[in-house]
Image: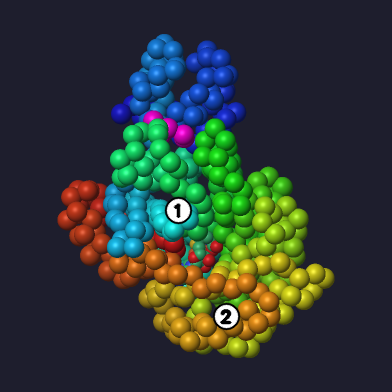
Amino acid sequence: MNEARTNLLGFSPAELIDYCGTLDEKPFRAKQLQRWIHQFGVSDFTGMTDLAKSLRGKLEKYAEIRAPAVIRDHTSADGTRKWLLDVGQGNAIETVYIPEDNRGTLCVSTQAGCAVNCLFCSTGKQGFSRNLTAAEIIGQLWMAEFALRRAKNMPEGKGERQISNVVMMGMGEPLFNFDASVSALRLMLDDNAYGLSRRRVTVSTSGVVPMIDRLARECPVALAVSLHATNDPLRDKLVPLNRKHPLPELMAACRRYLEYAPRDFITFEYCMLDGINDTDAHAKELVRLVQTGPDPVSCKLNLIPFNSIPMPGLKRSSDERIAAFAKILQDAGIVTTVRKTRGEDIDAACGLLAGEIKDRTRVKERMAESGMMPVSIVQDYRFQSNC
Ligand code: SAH
Ligand code: SF4
């Protein structure tokens, strides 16, 4: 493989036009190329049959279409499929596909690690390594969509779309990797690429207030905000970013976002932690938080049962407690759902890879045993996701 080749996978339509210009090719070639890449999943330029032979020759010499390499690929008994992907220098990320009756959702990562360091999150516990590039983010959708089509024996480029929804809820804080995340989002929405509607693409954030406003202006997709606490002293502890952007600021940003949002509500995610944020008093405080102020925040609540990570003092709330908490919200007229745990047998549920971190040696052994990677490479991988 020629290292100097230009990877076209994360290129925007404008960047592809510029690139075609550098090859002395007309701008309309860019659209053709984009379709071959993102609609037909073709990575071999020789297969791009409506491109002139001379152009195919140039592309073969100077360009490539490369997604992060798959280290591991597991499918759970419930159909949830999880890929571990190599992003170089000992970093790996995860992508999870969750099939449901009427939709297929892909959970993508935006960073290797995360600097926010929420108390209950295994990604945060590992620290921040680096931002993913646009190619690495969109590459997760590209890789997954065409792997799923192949699994159903659909010939390359043909067949029904498998992924109908994308959530940026894997590893990392998307709004701390704004430019690459937005480039990837735009490709998800582009009719010459994946053509997903804005309502079916969700960015989840821990509350990077200025970037919530930028997202509203530059690429308003569905927004999920990881709330997890109902007052500032508690949220300061659970989500340290709250010290910089406290709740009144965050709620104001949510109200502003609603003016641009493709859905008429914000989804609040709330990780249920036994005795910490799950009492009736917290539920009532939560109702006040979203329903009072200058105007209520139109929202849905998504309660996420905590997936255990090795952190003393943190425990998942009981099912009864979660139900009682949900009832208080529902009685106040707030649409509330409890996130189903999917893919537990392959550690694909929210934060579940934490179990593997406890024993990283075992993980390395398993990866080596799988024969997918030589032990020497497997040694240094760090990974887990929140999907
Ligand atoms: N950084 C972004 C997106 C990735 S995290 C954010 O925080 O929103 C995606 C979701 O998984 C967040 O709501 C996060 O709080 C949740 N999460 C993280 N660790 C978890 C755990 N151990 N159990 C349950 N949910 C968890
Ligand atoms: Fe980062 Fe989100 Fe995990 Fe917090 S919950 S540490 S913001 S990935």
Secondary structure found at label 1: strand
Point 40% across, 22% down: residue: 48
> Which picture quadrant has residue 18?
top right
- Residue 236 in sight here: no
Point 56% across, 51% down: residue: 201
Q: Which residues are magenta?
A: 38-42
345 falls in the magenta region: no
- Residue 81 in sight here: yes
Instruction: State which quarter of the image contains the C terminus.
Output: bottom left
Instruction: State which quarter of the image contains the N terminus.
Output: top left
- Name the residue that disc number 2 marks: 326
Secondary structure found at label 2: helix
x and y percentages locating residue 50 in the rendered image: 44, 17
User: What colouring does the structure picture have?
Assistant: rainbow
The amino acid type of the residue labelled 2 equals: Ala
**Mostly what secondary structure, the magenta segment?**
loop
- Name the residue that disc number 1 marks: 104
41 falls in the magenta region: yes
Point 57% across, 55% down: residue: 203
Point 30% across, 67% down: residue: 345
| In front of the other: 59 or 234 | 59
Distance CA(mark 1)–CA(mark 2): 26 Å
